[in-house]
Amino acid sequence: MFKKSHSQQHNRSLENEVILAVVVLYLLLAIVMTVVHYIQPAEQETVTSSTSPSHNERSSRQIKE
């Protein structure tokens, strides 16, 4: 009976540790993306590597203006 209780407690602890790790990773990524967004100079044009036609149209329109 002691081993079963200990095993369940260990599983809960491991589950909580994994949940905490996922939350911390999510927050870290959100903070890094926010910092990168605000570090970029306002006047700097961004270039995309996307092959989407809508991105190509938008980029060519901005260059012509």
Image: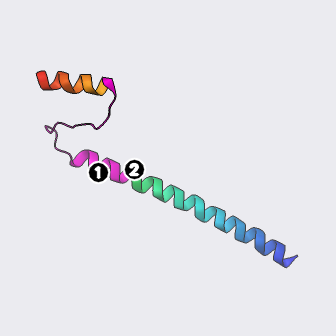
Residue 65: give x, y in percent of width and height.
11, 21
Number of numbered markers: 2
> What type is the residue that disc 1 sits on?
Val
Q: Which residues are magenta?
A: 31-53
In the displayed image of the protein, which residue is found farthest to the front?
51
Quadrant of residue 10 within the rendered picture: bottom right
| Earlier-in-chain disc, 2 versus 1 | 2
Instruction: Work out whether 3 lies above or below 61.
Output: below
Q: Is residue 41 magenta?
A: yes
Q: Residue at x 53, y 61 (%)?
A: 21
In the displayed image of the protein, which residue is found farthest to the left?
65
Residue 29: give x, y in percent of width and height.
40, 53
Q: Which residue is mark 2?
A: 30
Residue 41: give x, y in percent of width and height.
16, 43
Image check: 63 left or right of 54? left
Tell me the SS state at disc 1.
Answer: helix
